[in-house]
């Protein structure tokens, strides 16, 4: 599964806000900071949103962006 490929990978977070009121089926990634879980990425229809900056996440982040584009094109 798409999200499992990036499980336990580090990403670049710079914001202190979080998303809420997101349907479970739209939650793509959950992250945690100081034992607080929060939504890190969402997908609804053809829209994908990240709370972090994959473009600043090195090779993992760039691969995530490429995989995300491919995944969105499949649906």
Image (cartoon, rainbow, N blue to C red):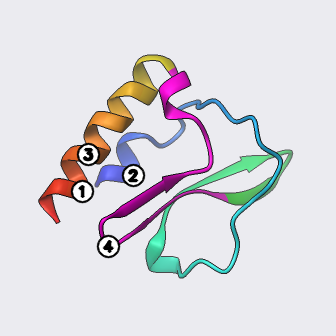
Q: Which residues are magenta?
A: 39-57
**Separation of disc 4 and disc 2 at Cα?**
16 Å
Q: Residue at x 43, y 25 (%)?
A: 60
Q: Residues within 10 Å of mark 1 (few under 14, many from 20)?
A: some
Q: Residue at x 13, y 59 (%)?
A: 74
Q: Residue 29 at what x, y percent from top left?
A: 52, 55
The answer to whether marks 4 and 3 mark residues whose Cβ atoms lie closer than 8 Å is no
Q: Is residue 60 above or below residue 73?
A: above
Which residue is labeled 1 in the image?
72
Q: Residue at x 75, y 59 (%)?
A: 18
- Is residue 44 rendered magenta in the image? yes
First-in-chain label (3 vs 2)? 2
Q: For the image shown, how many numbered marks are present on the structure?
A: 4
Q: Residue 70 at what x, y percent from top left?
A: 19, 46
Which corner quadrant holds the N terminus? bottom left
Which residue is labeled 3 in the image?
69
Q: Please, what secondary structure does the residue beneath circle 4 have?
A: loop
11 and 66: which one is in front? Answer: 66
The answer to whether marks 3 and 1 mark residues whose Cβ atoms lie closer than 8 Å is yes
Which residue is labeled 2 in the image?
3
First-in-chain label (4 vs 3)? 4
2 and 44: which one is in front? Answer: 44
Q: Residue at x 39, y 52 (%)?
A: 3
First-in-chain label (1 vs 4)? 4
């Amino acid at each position: 599964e798409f999200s499992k490929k990036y499980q336990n990978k580090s990403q670049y977070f710079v914001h202190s806000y979080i998303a809420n009121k997101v349907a479970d089926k739209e939650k793509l990634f959950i992250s945690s900071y100081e034992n607080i879980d929060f939504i890190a990425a969402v997908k609804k229809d053809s829209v994908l949103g990240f709370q972090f900056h994959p473009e600043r996440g090195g090779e993992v982040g760039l691969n995530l962006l490429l995989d995300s584009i491919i995944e969105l094109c499949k649906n």
